[in-house]
Image: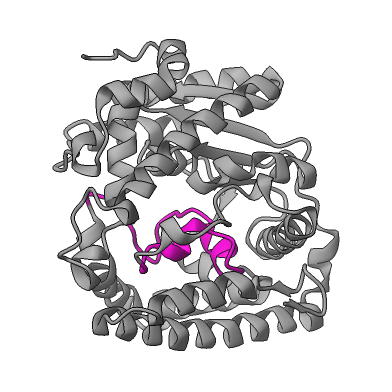
Amino acid sequence: MVFFSPSFYYIRLSVLRHMLQSAFGQWNWKLWLLSILFIFLYSIHLLLSLFFRLLDEIFHRGYKTTPINQPVFIIANPRSGTTYLHRLLALDDERFVYTKNAHTFFMSSSFVQFYQVIRWTDRHLMFNALRKLMKKLDEMFWGGWDDIHPMGFNKAEEDELVFAQTFNSPGMFIPFPIFHENNHNRFLDDEPETIRHNVIQFYASSIKRFVFRAGKNKTYLAKNVMSTGRYKTLLQAFPDAKIIYIARHPYDAVPSMASMFTVMYQFHSPNVPKRDISRKVWADYGIEFFQYAKTMRQSLPKEQFAAVKYDDLLREPHETIKGIYRHFGWPMSEQFLTKLHQEKVRQQNYQSKHEYSLEEFGLSAQEVYNELSDVMEEFGFEKEF
């Protein structure tokens, strides 16, 4: 469904229908409750999104001529350090403009202005009462994700919600144990041209709306793991884009991704074994991500593409960032270097509390190596069997 034009609003209703038919087609009262809640929240979000985008058309029409020059997209397999790299680069706020979690719910100029007014009012008139409340809400909504994917309304965040609200994101299937039944939404680059056109028109318009109010003279910085499967479509809209890819050992990235995307099973389907096809499909999807990313690396010119290893990023974040800046010819300010050093000190004692194994999701190291031996050899990953 297109509202006026794809750049104003676009929804892929066929995917929504499939999701709800599959959810209500089985008896699971928790899943039904989740689905009803999903419909309710999505309906409210849709109305608010249309409202804010309509305000843009009335009061912020300048967004249409806002140039998006050489945007930077950080992509990788999920659970490969993109959040960490994104937040490190976001420290260079003289160069980059980036979305915070709150922005991604309503990517529009009018919402950014509303967000800025609320923050100013809170700081100057309300003694930061709203900031304290939002901190508590962060703990309530996102506290359980701290060691999976640290989140917060005021933290730098990926812009996947822009794709999700059009139902062109695999992330929409996180609340539902039906991704294995889905034949669409895996790689946007493989979808019909009409769908690709509508999605990228909506996405490009959303970025313009955001940048127009948040940082017109800055470079848009995004991290989005799912955009690994959209890189061709992204380059159609932004042919001068820069892409940064992070490579993590498949034995770690694949099961970590499967665990993250099946986290809701603990609520609606706790008795489904981890090796069930509805869970294993996410691990298989992770392998497909690695394979598709290799195609990307082989097709992009060096001046547009940089690859880093996950282990190098965690071990030497300062040097990794410097290497990226040298590769793209970006100067580094003293202010940014100081912030990087402070972040390195803060992060150096971090260690994930979660470990995942391939066997949990019905895979073995041998099977993964058989599929990804060329990728593992390219990055020097040990096969370990």
Q: Residue 177's quadrant in the figure?
A: bottom left
Q: Nearer the viewer, residue 80 or 343?
A: 80
Residue placed at 78% from the left, 65% from the top? Answer: 63
In the displayed structure, 330 sits above or below 32; it is above
Q: Position of residue 106 (x, y in %)?
A: 57, 73
Q: Position of residue 37 (x, y in %)?
A: 37, 85
In the orientation shown, which residue stands out farthest toward the right? 65
Residue placed at 22% from the left, 14% from the top? Answer: 384
Visible in this render: residue 151?
Answer: yes
In the rendered structure, the answer to whether residue 145 lies left or right of residue 57 reads: left
Q: Magenta part of the protein: which range?
A: 147-176
In the displayed structure, 363 sits above or below 249; it is below
Q: Nearer the viewer, residue 374 or 219?
A: 374
- Image quarter where the C terminus lies is top left
Residue placed at 34% from the left, 44% from the top? Answer: 257
Residue placed at 42% from the left, 56% from the top? Answer: 180
Residue 153 sits inside the magenta stretch = yes
Q: Position of residue 190 (x, y in %)?
A: 67, 46
In the displayed structure, 317 sits above or below 16; it is above
Tally the numbered discs: 0
Visible in this render: residue 116?
Answer: no
Q: Position of residue 287 (x, y in %)?
A: 42, 34
In the rendered structure, the answer to whether residue 248 lies left or right of residue 96 reads: left
Q: Residue 14's quadrant in the figure?
A: bottom right
Q: Main secondary structure of the magenta part?
A: loop
Q: Residue 93's quadrant in the figure?
A: top right
Residue 173 sits inside the magenta stretch = yes
